[in-house]
Amino acid sequence: MLHFFNYLKADFYKFYHSNIIKLHLIIPIITVISFLAYYTISPWSELQKVMAYVQIISISFPLIISIIVNMVYEQEEEAGFQYFLGIADKKYFAHFSKLILMQILGLISTLIAILGFGIIFHSMGNSLIEIDVYIKESLIVFGSSILLYMLQYLVVFYLGRGASIGIGIIGSTISALMITGIGEGIWTLLPWGYSIRLSSYFLLYNLDILNKKEPITQAIIMMIVFITIFLALQLTLSNRWEGKRENY
């Protein structure tokens, strides 16, 4: 375990001396300021404003995650992947270190974007939704995106940057479609549908507007299945990875 923490420490220093940590702070802060400024003149209801905000955050996540993962990949590529190739055994420690650190930063970024927005929005006199709901919404959006980090990490290291960015763009497009009628009946089967659907459902459940719970259970089961599959693939492929990939 101490060995793993050393990897985390090394990766943190790498991230700190790049733009990765800065982006996790700057992007959510700019997003919060921009939407709050717009909402001061928007005629929408409070629920519509919060719902739209959380949905836009969810839609943007697949693409943003792909960009962040690509930045991490490029950092290692510039170093000739020596960080990974120089490890004799348990190479998965090095890969999981980066994956977990990205997710920690992602959680912080999500809390700033949603909880930060909620605190300021609530202080502006919008009291329909309590602060604890924004905390839970942050956790739902982030939790639903964990498997996207795992997917993107596998894609960028085994298929290349082009494939990763392409999947990020497609993922954001699918996410936007999953909240429409197109997503009915299929959103529980697609990793990009969880964040936008679950966060929207939770908001409506909290206000006693929606009571249908069956799809949520199915979605959670499928999320666990996907995470288990991606975890198994990462464990299996990490020790076999030799710095080669097809760059589509």
Image: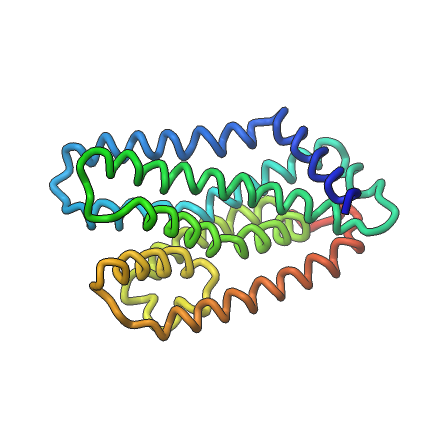
Q: Position of residue 85 (x, y in %)?
A: 82, 43
Q: Is residue 225 above or below residue 105?
A: below
Looking at the image, residue 105 sits to the left or right of residue 139; the answer is right
Q: Is residue 20 above or below residue 129?
A: above
Q: Position of residue 237 (x, y in %)?
A: 74, 58
> Foreground residue, 166 or 144?
144
Instruction: Tell me which corner region of the image, top left, top right, bottom left or bottom right, holds residue 192.
Output: bottom left
Residue at point 24%, 38% (across, down): 122
Instruction: Tell me which corner region of the image, top left, top right, bottom left or bottom right, holds residue 112.
Output: top left
Looking at the image, residue 3 sits to the left or right of residue 231; the answer is right
Q: Is residue 49 above or below residue 192?
A: above
Outermost top residue: 17
Instruction: Tell me which corner region of the image, top left, top right, bottom left or bottom right, holds residue 28.
Output: top left
Residue at point 44%, 68% (across, down): 219
Q: Position of residue 206 (x, y in %)?
A: 27, 59
Looking at the image, residue 35 sits to the left or right of residue 238; the answer is left
Q: Position of residue 91 (x, y in %)?
A: 79, 49
Looking at the image, residue 46 sits to the left or right of residue 66; the answer is left
Residue at point 62%, 48% (across, down): 156
